[in-house]
Amino acid sequence: MSNRLEATTPPSYQYIDSTGHLEGLISDLRGSDRAGLDMEANSLHHYFEKVCLIQITIGDNDYIVDPLGDIDLTDLLAALAETNLILHAADYDMRMMLSSFGFRPGRPVFDTMIAAQVVGEEALGLVTVAANFLGVELTKDGQKSNWAQRPLTERQLAYASDDTRYLEPLADKLEARLAELGRETWHREWCARVVDQAAQPVRRDPDDAWRIKGAGVLQPDQLVYLRAIWTWRDGQAQEIDKPAFKVLSNPQLISLAEWCAANPETSLSQGPRLPKSCTNGRRYKALRDAITSAKAAPEDEWPKRRKGKGLPPMEDSIKSSVRTLQDQCAVLGEKLELRSSVIAPRAALIGIARNEPTTAEEIAEASGLMNWQAELIEPIVKKVLHA
């Protein structure tokens, strides 16, 4: 295609951290039909997430925009909204662009990760997909950078520019494969759904947030401590604007909750080893108060154990139908060289078995599947539930 696909080509980009330098980028955007887009946030280093870099590639021109600089992004965001955007794993980026800048795309988004799923790829990371379709070797070296720190190194900026540098040729390759398989409409619908969902406000059940990995095996007398300690940790993390795991890790949280339940009369100083920052001062006192509060909670206020992980409960009467639907979707998946979960995840099949829909429209309504998925499995549903 061009020397841009050679992994050895040194990165070249324009770094923009002031409003006055945006004019060329905006002009380039308005003169182009599409652009590759990515962003870097600071979630690994701060509690309060924000966009720290915006990477844009238009043809052979790579730009890195620094929103933390002295810069007004109004005109840039307006130009982006009028451009067909290419992203890899668009969901998080779209959510962050909306929460940080109020940005919503005004034209269709082409998600290369979704395209890779639809054409049957197993590994979906940009490094692997770019290697498989373009023969490009990208690096993961910058993934854990603190993107809020300034100045950024040349190595960090080179990593950031690579995230968009190959999106246009990658989209071309994937678009051709989608057309070959006749799956362009599948991809378009999936991308539209991702963009739409990213624009919806996130509603979290307060009783879900503290149920971290490992909590499912705890008993109610342990869960009451876990909830209290998690709430303490969340407050401390907000106070210092650091990720919660930098206050206390999830395994440490679980271990401490188990110890508290087994040793309710023992001083915290005799408990599991804690990070030095949690062993004295206001933070230590707040932790002791949280544990004391949990200890005093009446039994009828203890959290209940939960079974499963986000899947709807399944009645015995539909278990056989769900298993058969899963088996049939697996057969179809092998034929199409798709994972069965891409065709229809188990939760969707439970909804289908429970409601026994007869048309593709009813299948989509009962399961939350996209139209293309519902149409794909309509013959299976009729065979299994209505034969």
Image (cartoon, helix red, strand yellow):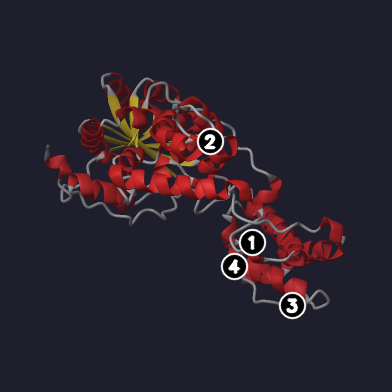
Residue at the location (38% across, 33% down)? 376
On the rendered structure, is 238 left or right of 350? right
Front one among 178 and 34: 178
- Asked if 329 appears above or below 292 in the picture, the reply is above
Q: Secondary structure at mark 4?
A: helix
- For mark 4, what is the residue? 251
Q: Closer to us: mark 2 or mark 3?
A: 2
Tell me where residue 69 appears, x and y as whole percent: 44, 37
Q: How far is the residue under mark 2 from the one under mark 4?
A: 35 Å
Work out whether mark 3 precedes mark 1 in sequence or the reverse, and give the earlier one.
1
Outermost residue to the left: 2
Q: How far is the residue under mark 2 from the one under mark 3?
A: 51 Å
Q: Amino acid at mark 4?
A: Pro
What is the number of the mark on residue 367? 2
Q: Amino acid at mark 1?
A: Gly
- Asked if 216 appears above or below 62 in the picture, the reply is below
Q: How far is the residue under mark 3 from the one under mark 1?
A: 27 Å
Q: Secondary structure at mark 2?
A: helix
Residue at the location (56% across, 33% down)? 366
Q: Closer to us: mark 2 or mark 1?
A: 2
Q: Closer to us: mark 3 or mark 1?
A: 1
On the rendered structure, is 153 left or right of 349? left
